[in-house]
Image (cartoon, rainbow, N blue to C red):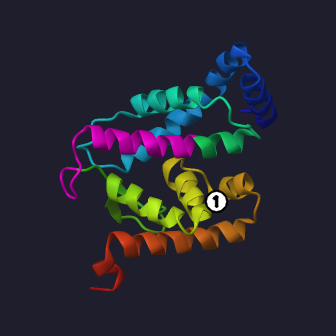
Amino acid sequence: MHQGEVTALLQAWRGGDQGALEKLVPLVYAELRRRARAHMRREQASNTLEATELVHETFERLVRARQVDWRDRTHFFAVWARLMRRVLVDHARSRGYLKRGGGLTFVPIGDSAEVPHDTVEVLALDEALTRLAAFDPRKVEIIEMRFFAGMTAQETAEALGTSLESIKWEWRMARAWLLRELDPERARGG
């Protein structure tokens, strides 16, 4: 997928060109579906949301968010990550899983190479991210991009206009904070 073409289509779409949206969808759909499938594979089998459904629901929200000042393909995926988080949280809530441990979908919080088996509940993760946003919204953006959209550290650095080393460090700090918030006993080594 050519980044310049995606950027031009995003900006044309924002300007009201519906034809641009129709051209954009085939350019990004396979990548969105791949990322959604990768995310859904990390969740428990009890989740009833399919990757295709996740892509479609997120895309519907994206269409309504037309006023975004699209910068480029990377920014598109960053916005996509935030919307996908909202879809997953809304889906968990709509299933009636309001109490901690009440059948919530579980999702891993780390890179498969670094933290292969850490899991947290979707709603608990969302609540923790909301708390983190109160004092460090940038780390929330990083988590959304890396965890929800499956963006690489390099893509995340590009989206946020910072260095790869900075993103790697902030990602480690954010994951450590989340682990402490979501599993305090394990974080203490108990």
User: Where in the figure is residue 180, as x and y percent of width and height?
Assistant: 39, 76
Q: Nearer the viewer, residue 146 or 98?
A: 98
Report which quarter residue 73 is drawn in.
Answer: top right
Q: Name the side, left or right, on which 119 lies relative to 21.
A: left
Q: Is residue 18 left or right of residue 86?
A: right
| Residue 90 part of the magenta-drawn span | yes
Three-letter code, disc 1: Ala
Residue 105 placement (x, y as % from top left): 28, 49
Is residue 162 or residue 96 the one in the foreground? 96
- Asked if 101 appears above or below 185 in the picture, the reply is above
Q: Please identify the residue farthest to the left as the structure is shown.
A: 102
- Which region shows up in magenta? 80-103
Q: Position of residue 132 (x, y in %)?
A: 49, 66
Q: Count numbered badges in the picture.
A: 1
Instruction: Note whether 78 is above or below 152 in the view shown.
Output: above
Q: Residue furthest front?
A: 134
Q: For the view shown, which residue lies furthest in the top direction?
A: 19
Residue of label 1: 153
The quarter of the picture where the N terminus appears is: top right
The residue under the point 57% across, 40% down is 80
Q: Quadrant of residue 110?
A: bottom left
142 relative position to 20: left or right: left
Quadrant where the C terminus sits is: bottom left
- Work out whether 80 lies above or below 121: above
Judged from the image, the secondary structure of the residue bearing numbered disc 1 is helix
Q: Seen in the image, is 4 located left or right of residue 54?
A: right
Q: Residue at x 18, y 52 (%)?
A: 102
